[in-house]
Image (tube, rainbow, N blue to C red):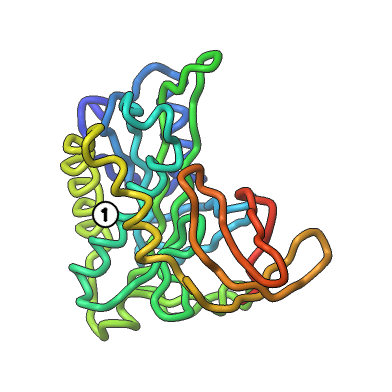
Amino acid sequence: MEQRQLYNILDSVDSTNNYAMGKVHEGLATHGMAWFAHSQTAGKGQRGKEWKSEAGKNVLLSIVLKPELVFRSRPFCFSAFIALCCHEVLVSQTQQPFHIKWPNDLFWGDRKAGGILIENNFTGTEWKWAVVGIGINVNQAEFKEVQSHAVSLSEITNEYINPQVLGAILHETILKKYKKVNENNVGSLVPRFNELLYKKDQEVRLRKNFAVFQTTVKGVNDTGQLLTTDTQERVFNYGGVEWIL
């Protein structure tokens, strides 16, 4: 039975996050269950954007996790933890440097290799489940115009990488490291995130509402807000500002 397996393979699905959240609502999800899809018909990105992916060429993965107590008062630490795990896997698989673009995209140079979309399930105010969606460009070579800043791991390494195997490595890495997070080490997650922050201490262009402006990225605070400086110190919530690449 599918619900007894931790790592499940789907041929095609609208969205692995939708599928995983459906299992949560049906009461069929358990901690650590994951669904890898060869194809998505309605993949989701950040800020409600659609992300197209060629069938069979990429990692399309969603993992259901039960938020540990250590994360419940530090939700951004959970997001940082996932991003850091993905970063570690990409570096180990390619031997190339990657950065984390706020809030949780994975960049090689100025090009996006992957992204993370975390959707949560609450009962009242209690954070019951997190559905962690991970999309990694693996063997795709052509991208839509709106994805012109994208890059795949095969373009970086000039080698074929098995997406299903890479998905399993991501799944295993996250579960293994998740068991080790505690009150003694959770405080190191945001500083490490900032060490790997894309464009840290560099000037970038951001758009807020309809205004585009230049500002220097300084870091991300413990609640996940982006900190920048120009003629003044600025603090941005997730969703309140958009990068102009």
Q: For the residue carrying disc 1, how many other residues have a C-alpha within 10 Å: few (<14), some (14-19), or many (20+)?
A: many
Q: Position of residue 216 (x, y in %)?
A: 59, 73
User: Which residue is outermost to the right?
Assistant: 210
Q: Nearer the viewer, residue 153 or 190?
A: 190
| Residue lying at 30% horizontally and 39% vertically, measured from the top left | 34
Residue 82 coordinates in the image, percent (x, y): 34, 48
How many numbered callouts?
A: 1
- Residue at 35% x, 20% y: name it: 28
Residue 87 percent coordinates (x, y): 30, 62
Q: Nearer the viewer, residue 213 or 51?
A: 213
Residue that extends furthest to the front in the rendered view of this protein: 232
Q: Which residue is mark 1?
A: 167
Task: Check the picture and name the quadrant holding the C terminus.
Answer: bottom right
Left or right: 173, with 220 as reference point: left
- Nearest the eye: 156 or 213: 213
Mark 1 is on which residue type?
A: Gly
Instruction: Tell me the residue at 55%/60% (across/down).
Output: 51
Name the residue furthest bottom. Answer: 158
Q: Is residue 42 visible?
A: no
Compared to residue 55, the image places residue 130 above or below, namely above
Res. 107 image quadrant: bottom left
Q: Is residue 163 above or below residue 151?
A: above
Q: Secondary structure at mark 1?
A: helix
Q: Residue furthest top?
A: 124
Q: Quadrant of the N terminus?
A: top left
- Does residue 54 appear in the picture of this structure? yes
